[in-house]
Every structure is written in C-alpha cells, then in structure tokens.
Amino acid sequence: MLVVRPAGPADLDHLLELAILSGPGFTSLPEDPDALAERLDLSQASFEGKVPWQEAWYTLMLEDGDTGDIDGVGSVKATVGLKRPFFSFRVVNNTVQSPSLGVKLDHQTLVLVNECTGWTEVGSLFLKADRRKGGAGRLLSQSRYMLIGAQPDLFADMVLAELRGVFTPDGACPFWDHVAHKFFPMEFDDADRMTGSTDKQFILDLAPRHPIYVELLPEPARAVIGKVHPQGVPAMALLESEGFRPNGLVDIFDAGPTVACGRDNIRTVRDARRLKVELVDTVQAELPALISTDSVAAFRAVRAKADIDGDAVRLTAETAAALKVDAGASVRVKS
C-alpha cells in the first residue's frame, strides 16, 4: 500500500535523488544537499509545531509500504512572501485606440508584481517516472489538501501553485534565453538556486522596472508565456480538478503559470468528511477512498477501500496500520 507521510532529516538521500530526477526549472527541488537538508529540518519542525505557523513548510513523501521505496514528494508552504518577496509577472492587457484613425489595438505587457504575500503554496509535486500511473500522483497531490483540511487555521485563505514553464528537450528555456537572461546575467540554474536560498534582493535589484511589451519579444518567448512544461500537464489537470484556475501571473524566469483557489473551495478540502474509525476484517466498498489522519502532527494519507456508515468509517487492520490509527480515532475521508 502506498502511504503519504511527513518528511524528515532521514529522507535526505531520497529527496536529493528526486531533485536530480526532476530536472531544470524545478525551483523547489534544488540539487543542493545543504538546502535540502535545511528544508527537511524545517519540515520536521513544522509537523512538530516548533515554528510559527506562518513559517511552516511541510514536505510529504510518497512511500511504498511494502518495499520502503520513496517514489515521490509534495509540499505545502503555509505562507509565501512574508520574509522574502514572492515575485511574478502579471500579464496585463492594455487597449489603445485612435478614433480619428478608426484604430483599436490590444497590447499585452508583463509587469513585475508581488501580489501573493501571505498566501499558502502547494508545490514540489514530483513522482518517479514508473509511478506516474495507477493513481499515485492523485494520492500525493490530494494528500496536500487533506493536510490543509486537517487544520485549516494553520493555512491562508488563498492557496496558489506555480507550474514549471516550457523547456526544450535539451534543457533550454525559451523565456529565460530571450527575456529573463537579459536582466539576470547568469545561468538559469544559478538564478533558480538563488531564488530558493537567498532573500531575493538580486531580483529586486535587477528585474525590469517597466512593463515589457509581449509583442516586442521573439516568437519563441511569446509562445511559452503561461504554458506548462510537458511533465507538468498531469499536475495542471489535477489542480484544475480541485478548482484551481490561472490568475494571470507567470514565473519571472520561465513564464510558467500560477493557479489559485480559495482554501475552503478546494474540492478535497471542502468534500472530505471527519469520521470515526471502526475496524473490520473485510470491507464491501468496490472503489477506494482517500483517507487521512485528522491532525497535522501525525499526518498520514492512503487510498484504500472503506465502508462509510453515518459518522463511522470501517477500515481493515492493514489500512489502519498504514495510517497508524486505532479504533475510535478520527480520520478524514473523501470518497
């Protein structure tokens, strides 16, 4: 059985492997052991409630309960933009017209903004290639919303996700090469690393102060604004199924889209029910349900068959063991 569980310092080798496999442009998974170690320390402290809620960053690992293999990672950052700015480009439509000439034109511009301060961010969703089927990705993705729903007061009213922008098969990023690199004279990987490991002052120092007219950009750059990396298409579909929609913001380095949804309107947060566990030898349900514990500190999530009867849910001993819950415990269930 696959189980989603909190990540901690002991997961460093697994997280580094996933970071390497994720490839370029995955800002939240840098190929930097020191940065990843700090993140895992913060994850453990976050789950244990040892940091202010606004500073919490919860990292989740997808583990094969039979083999112990770690096959994926996801995360929830309680807030963004409070200690370090959260920069984006807003795609702005500007209409100009000349009545005397009978001309009306629409121009798109990119404007540097910091609009998502204090929002919660779901991200870092990555699975090994051989796990991208059979519902593993959906389990890992939805587990983040089950975490938020367990204690909503630890998260912001608005939730966002950034999706990786378009890269070519050889690792080049058209938007970076034709636009962002003109303002940040460094390699993409260096800018990507500095975004996650510094106070982002370099962005404030070097980013364009004035709107960038999209029509003046080379076609390869225009074509990828707001587009998702091919590997991110399934993640985008999962986000849309939860109610997330593009909000007009794109990443300043690769132009990947930002999507957002109100916390209480996220489908999994809204629809999951809090039920009491009853243990049984067998269950009658034909389809599995999404089941998680009811607290952040002891968070675990699985997809397993369960029978719901009023305010109770009947689980097998195997499912209860995967969740580390006993009869009478409170869990959250989304069928």
Image (cartoon, rainbow, N blue to C red):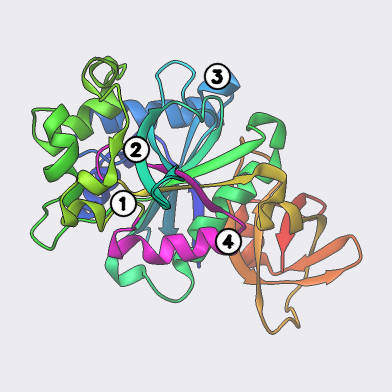
Query: In the rendered image, which residue does mark 3 sit on?
Result: 50
The image's mark for residue 110 is 2
Q: What residue type is disc 2 on?
A: Leu
Residue at position x 60%, y 49% in the image: 145
Which tag, 4 or 2, sits closer to the chain's start? 2
Q: Position of residue 92 (x, y in %)?
A: 43, 41
- Report the amino acid beneath label 3: Lys
Which of the two discs, 3 and 4, labels the residue nearer the N terminus? Answer: 3
Residue hosting label 4: 302
User: What's the amino acid at mark 1?
Assistant: Ile
Which residue occupies the foreground of this view, 185 or 39? 185
Q: Which residues are magenta?
A: 227-254
Question: From mark 1 to mark 3, how far is it between C-alphas?
Answer: 40 Å
Q: Is residue 294 left or right of residue 20?
A: right
Vertical placement of residue 41 versus 170, above or below: above
Disc 2 element: strand
**From the viewer's perspective, is 36 left or right of 332?**
left
Q: How far is the residue under mark 2 from the one under mark 1?
A: 10 Å
Q: Position of residue 30 (x, y in %)?
A: 23, 38
Instruction: Give the side of residue 233 with respect to residue 154, left or right.
Output: left
Q: Check if mark 4's residue and mark 2's residue have beta carbons within 8 Å.
A: no
Q: Distance from label 2 to label 3 (Cα)? A: 40 Å
Nearest-to-viewer mark from 4 and 2: 2
Q: Is residue 3 magenta?
A: no
Helix, strand or loop at mark 3: loop
* Amino acid of disc 4: Val
